[in-house]
Amino acid sequence: MAWLRTILHADMDAFYASVEQLDNPQLRGKPLLIGVDHPRSVVSTASYEARPYGVGSAMPMVEAKRRCPQAIIVPPRMQRYAEVSEQIMTVFGNFSPHIEPLSLDEAFVDLTGSERLLGAPEVVARNVKAAVKLATGGLNVSVGVSGCKYVAKVASDFRKPDGLLIVPPEEMVAFLAPLPISRLWGVGKRGEEQLRNLDLRTIADVAAADPFWLKQRLGSLGVHVYALAHADDPRPVVSDREAHSISSEETLDVDVSGRAAIAPYLLRAADRVARRLRRAGLRAGGVRVKLKTDKFQSLTRQVVLRPPATSSAVLYDEACKLLGHFDLYQRFRLIGVTAYDLRPESAPIQGLLFGETERKKNDKLDRALDSLRERFGKGAVQRGSDMGAAERFGLPTGKMPED
Ligand code: TTP
Ligand code: MG
């Protein structure tokens, strides 16, 4: 059986707990419970060191502490997890434009038809894992690849942590067969109980059942589980371009501080992001600046763009204004710009009277530069301000390594 569709599912290992261990080396190798130490709170997640004690997500904190008293309780830092989430979604987006995030730490990626470009599923899966590790500074993601969403999701969970499993289309049904019915997607506790009452315990039991009987006894649930048990899941990967973002980040050879030293890098990043926006036919409803200090602390500031923009100059100007919200006396090792809240260029723009001429002028200039670059190579043209900055600060100029 050929790979009619190639779907990858990626899910971070013990996500919140792993981020805490990444940011605080003293927590590495130790049992952690992420959550608030309160009589009525529940555990968000537990590190893999704590899981042998039978603790995990959604368990009351009181119960988790009883089972694993030596665990360190760490309060969640949602903003930091959102930031890491953005890093990993950007990585997935580099493999395919068709990505569907399911939560902060997991996404489907549709790789259909990309084998010649990216390699066999096993190669892509390894590359995704390595790219996530690199982008996050060391986090593990578990990956499953198969011929449909459902089996890819089961596969990514199968060898956790640091898992990788490829289930070719012809092996999907056999792979599912021995698994318990709790692995059927979308079957809650009550559904499981209904299946057990019919003496169906494994997915093979469901696959072998008479579909008419299943439908008669369970209604739509019966139709659903019969299809899943046969790895029949045609749901497409639905990418949400609006939730997606485009970033350009640069890790510097030498740390910098102060507005004058940071601005040229910001300009280069803003220009790259804006060009990618224009190439994709998108406008950004917001822009974000990210600075990472020499102590590896990531700081971000963002602003909404009204109207949404696609021009390098607008992105750069707004990014420069955002610099005023950082303490620029620190030393920075990474500078980045992200365009987020993306929408198609053709979408109607509201509130466009003020500054319209300026915007049109910028758009025209951008497009002229884009087409020159396309015709004569990436180093052929630079904005005057970019040149000056490069000269003044000795930035490498002609190269555009990210494009
Ligand atoms: P999961 O991917 O379900 O769990 P996990 O990443 O912690 O562990 P693994 O995938 O290796 O089994 O959820 C991702 C994050 O979402 C998790 O780190 C914390 C949060 N979460 C909750 O806050 N409450 C919950 O009930 C669940 C399931 C997750
Ligand atoms: Mg996870």
Image: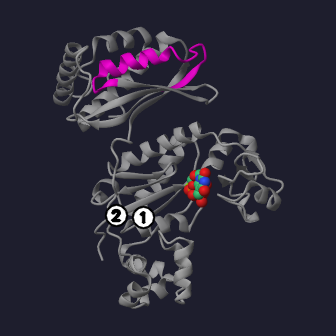
Residue that badge 1 annotates? 145
Q: Say if 245 sits above or below 311 in the image.
A: below
Which quadrant contains ligand 1?
bottom right
Q: Which residues are magenta?
A: 306-335
Q: Secondary structure at mark 1?
A: strand
Toward the viewer: 336 or 85? 85
Toward the viewer: 40 or 187? 40
Q: Amino acid at mark 2?
A: Thr
Residue that badge 2 annotates? 6
Q: Quadrant of residue 363?
A: top left
Query: Can I make out residue 399 in this image?
Result: no
**Residue at horizontal 61 percent and vertical 29 percent from the top:** 297
- On screen, residue 141 versus residue 50, left or right, reads left
Q: Sort mark 2 into few (<14), some (14-19) or many (20+) by Cα contacts within 10 Å.
A: many
**Residue at horizontal 23 percent and vertical 34 percent from the top:** 345
**Residue at horizontal 48 percent and vertical 88 percent from the top:** 205
Q: Position of residue 50 (x, y in %)?
A: 74, 58
Decide whether residue 333 is among the magenta residues: yes
Q: Position of residue 26 (x, y in %)?
A: 76, 42
- On screen, residue 273 versus residue 136, left or right, reads left
Q: Amino acid at mark 1?
A: Val
**Residue at horizontal 35 percent and vertical 75 percent from the top:** 232
Toward the viewer: 330 or 227? 227
Decide whether residue 398 is among the magenta residues: no
Query: Can I make out residue 160 in this image?
Result: yes
